Image (spheres, rainbow, N blue to C red):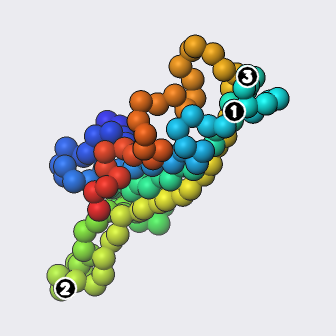
Amino acid sequence: PNYLDAFRPLPSNPRLYSLKVRNNNLLLRNGIHILPTLEPWIATFNAWSIDVEGEFVRFEVQDIDNEVHPDPIFGHEAQVYVREGIPVYDPTTNLPIGDNLRIKFNFTTGTFIVVPPGKITGVGDKNTINPIEETPGWSII
């Protein structure tokens, strides 16, 4: 399965998108016409700010070559590290001792491009007036 899909929620939780992307066109809809003058121009410049948020629903690392946990029948047991959104309980008393939070990440980056004019649909040629494009999960908190 695609664990980082920005366009579909997880089947087990329709409110959880594991990846969200927001694309903000900084120079509005069609960019800036440059070189040499405004009309006719020979290039268009555009820039975007891109915000990304995501989380891993379950993150697991297994060290199967670890000899710290010996087992007389199988040689040794794997050492396992798991992060997922569930509480942690003491195995002897069954009392809660903490939370095991999901791994979350977010970052902002930017990009820019210069393209020649023409009849071919290019960068910045959108049918929308809103300069911000978001994946479906962006507005879900």
Q: On the image, which quarter does residue 75 sit in?
A: bottom left
Q: Position of residue 132 (x, y in %)?
A: 45, 47
Regarding mark 2 in the picture, which secondary structure is present there?
A: loop
Disc number lying in front (3 or 1): 3
| Disc sitting over residue 33 in the figure | 1
Disc 3 from disc 1: Cα separation: 9 Å
Which callout, 1 or 2, points at the residue further toward the start of the chain?
Answer: 1
Q: Are marks 2 and 3 in contact (CB under 8 Å)?
A: no
Q: Mark 3 sits on what residue?
A: 40
Q: Disc 2 marks which amino acid? A: Leu
The front one of 78 and 52 is: 52
Residue at x-position 52% and y-position 28%: 125
Regarding mark 3 in the picture, which secondary structure is present there?
A: loop
Determine the residue located farthest toward the top in the rendered image: 119
The local crowd at label 3, few if under 14, some if 14 to 19, many if 20 or more residues have their Cα within 10 Å, is: few
Rendered view: 136 above or below 33: below
- Say whether residue 130 is left or right of residue 58: right
Disc 1 from disc 2: Cα separation: 65 Å
Q: Disc 3 marks which amino acid? A: Pro
Q: Position of residue 86 (x, y in %)?
A: 25, 68
Regarding mark 1 in the picture, which secondary structure is present there?
A: strand
Q: Mark 2 sits on what residue?
A: 95
